[in-house]
Image (cartoon, rainbow, N blue to C red):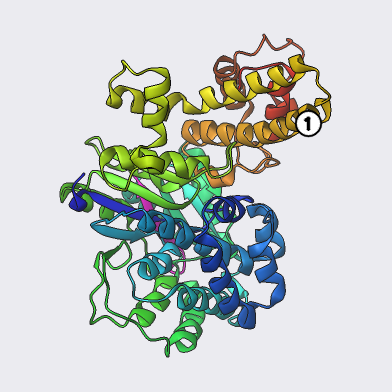
């Protein structure tokens, strides 16, 4: 795979899940020192509590961090992206360009060598402190917020123009089916009512501030002051900014530009189109979840390959190992143990007559099913042995059930996000589909039917209403209780 065809994407708000850092640290020895460096840099600025959250065996999930320790969440998002990229680089990945989405631009600049991981952590911490020092005011979650609307930027702008609030507007252009707005609550509430009349999806995002809006001007000034003395280095790899609409240059004052991000629109769709037109055909997402991978697939008309690296599924760091296998088959990183990737080893052992390209496609689409089958077969084997290992079997079953439910909730979030054209981050386990996201009973019924087909559920009793399954957690419990095919 030629070096010039690969872009690495660094996600921003919401790109985290509870096990992300622990999975990386447990599987890849080089991650521990990076997290320790980030923690040492953050401790004097955010305190021991935030760093303890970062280095815990299991970090709290995104919703809990957003509620109890939002500054720790920003640091965790940055740490996951930086550590994942370290793993990719250690195995030989040499991308043409790096792209950060909002907060992700800090990790992208660190990956390019402009700042060290510790300096990047300081920037992230100062960013959070500047927001706090500026005071929530109109920019805080009480008086302002961000919302995703299910339409393109032109149509979204017309809604903004109808309301006519100069402090509210478009914050992020993700793809033709999703634009993010940011601004005062009164204005966005009015836009939400207009969107409902026009049957345009509208969902409030769980963001602590109205990022990329004029409301954050005071915070931007404080942020610029705080990071002005952090020294930048020459870029080793090109970094294209969706906010600037161009690649960074060594002559740029990076700290000033980063501070300006608070009030400037993110044109992610334009950046991806430009890179694809310039020959980039592989987009690797360095960070937790796969939001940018899914968005990229919606933007580019010609087929491209997207490779997420950290997903909340069974097997700890298995998604990153699988990503490395895919990249090794492309020739983009060194092959796995013994010079042969895991996928190639499995093909040789199980299906040696199948072409490598076909097996890669199979493993990418059904590898999770094969692992789940193998795990269940192993548990059955333990039971059949009857050699006093029932305790181990029981613990293994409990662990599988716990992981399977987490995976299932994530799968449901993806299904509902795709169907409703909402960002997957708005779908938490306990989010009320109607009260919080405005999904009416007709649409809920339609989606339950789709879920029933996907997981091979028995027919639902006629007296059970969709309102009984108004959260993804309840739907996941229904699937597991019904013996659905997960």
128 left or right of 230 in image: right
Q: Is residue 139 above or below residue 308?
A: below
Q: Residue 423 or 385: which is nearer the viewer? A: 385
x, y (%) of residue 430? 71, 41
Q: In this view, does 349 lie above or below 155?
A: above
Residue at horizontal 54%, vertical 68%?
33
Q: Is residue 155 above or below residue 87?
A: above
Residue 173 painted magenta: yes
Q: Could you tell me which quadrant the C terminus lies in?
A: top right
> Where is mark 1, residue-wise?
392
What is the magenta range? Answer: 166-177
User: Can residue 30 be seen at all in this image of the molecule?
Assistant: yes
| Number of numbered callouts drawn | 1
Q: Residue 56 or 134: which is nearer the viewer? A: 56
Residue 244 painted magenta: no
- Quadrant of residue 295 within the rendered picture: top left
Residue at horizontal 60%, vertical 13%?
456
Q: Could you tell me which quadrant the N terminus lies in?
A: top left
131 left or right of 265 in image: right
x, y (%) of residue 465? 73, 20
């Amino acid at each position: 795979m030629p070096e010039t065809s690969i872009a690495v994407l660094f996600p921003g708000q919401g790109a985290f899940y509870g096990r992300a850092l622990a999975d990386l640290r447990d599987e890849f020895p080089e991650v521990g020192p990076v997290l320790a460096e980030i923690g040492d840099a953050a401790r004097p600025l955010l305190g021991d509590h935030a760093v303890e959250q970062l280095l815990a065996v299991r970090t709290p999930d995104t919703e809990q961090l957003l509620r109890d320790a939002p500054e720790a969440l920003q640091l965790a998002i940055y740490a996951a992206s930086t550590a994942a990229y370290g793993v990719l680089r250690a195995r030989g990945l040499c991308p043409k360009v790096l792209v950060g989405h909002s907060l992700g631009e800090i990790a992208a600049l660190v990956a390019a060598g402009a700042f060290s991981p510790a300096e990047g952590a300081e920037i992230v911490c100062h960013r959070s402190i500047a927001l706090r020092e500026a005071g929530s005011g109109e920019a805080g979650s009480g008086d302002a917020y961000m919302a995703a609307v299910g339409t393109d930027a032109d149509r979204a702008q017309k809604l903004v123009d109808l309301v006519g609030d100069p402090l509210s507007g478009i914050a992020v252009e993700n793809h033709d089916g999703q634009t993010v707005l940011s601004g005062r609550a009164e204005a966005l509430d009015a836009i939400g009512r207009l969107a409902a009349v026009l049957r345009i999806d509208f969902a409030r995002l769980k963001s602590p501030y109205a990022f990329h809006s004029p409301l954050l001007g005071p915070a931007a000034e404080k942020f610029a002051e705080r990071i002005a003395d952090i020294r930048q280095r020459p870029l080793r790899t090109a970094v294209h900014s969706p906010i600037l609409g161009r690649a960074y240059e060594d002559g740029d004052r990076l700290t000033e530009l980063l501070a300006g991000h608070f009030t400037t629109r993110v044109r992610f769709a334009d950046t991806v189109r430009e890179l694809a037109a310039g020959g980039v055909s592989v987009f690797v997402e360095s960070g937790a979840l796969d939001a940018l991978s899914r968005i990229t697939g919606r933007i580019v008309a010609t087929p491209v390959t997207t490779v997420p690296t950290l997903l909340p599924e069974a097997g700890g760091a298995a998604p990153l190992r699988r990503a490395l296998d895919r990249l090794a088959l492309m020739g983009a990183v060194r092959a796995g143990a013994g010079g042969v990737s895991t996928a190639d080893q499995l093909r040789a052992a199980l299906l040696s007559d199948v072409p490598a390209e076909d097996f890669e496609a199979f493993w990418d689409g059904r590898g999770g099913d094969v692992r789940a089958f193998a795990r269940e077969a192993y548990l059955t084997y333990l039971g059949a042995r009857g050699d006093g290992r029932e305790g181990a079997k029981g613990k293994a079953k409990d662990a599988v059930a716990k992981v399977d439910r987490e995976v299932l909730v994530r799968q449901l979030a993806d299904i509902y996000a795709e169907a409703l054209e909402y960002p997957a981050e708005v779908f938490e386990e306990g989010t009320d589909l109607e009260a919080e996201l405005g999904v009416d009973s007709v649409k809920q019924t339609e989606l339950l039917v789709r879920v029933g087909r996907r997981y091979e559920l028995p027919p639902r009793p006629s007296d059970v209403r969709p309102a009984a399954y108004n959260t993804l957690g309840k739907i996941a419990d229904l699937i597991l209780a019904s013996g659905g095919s997960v």
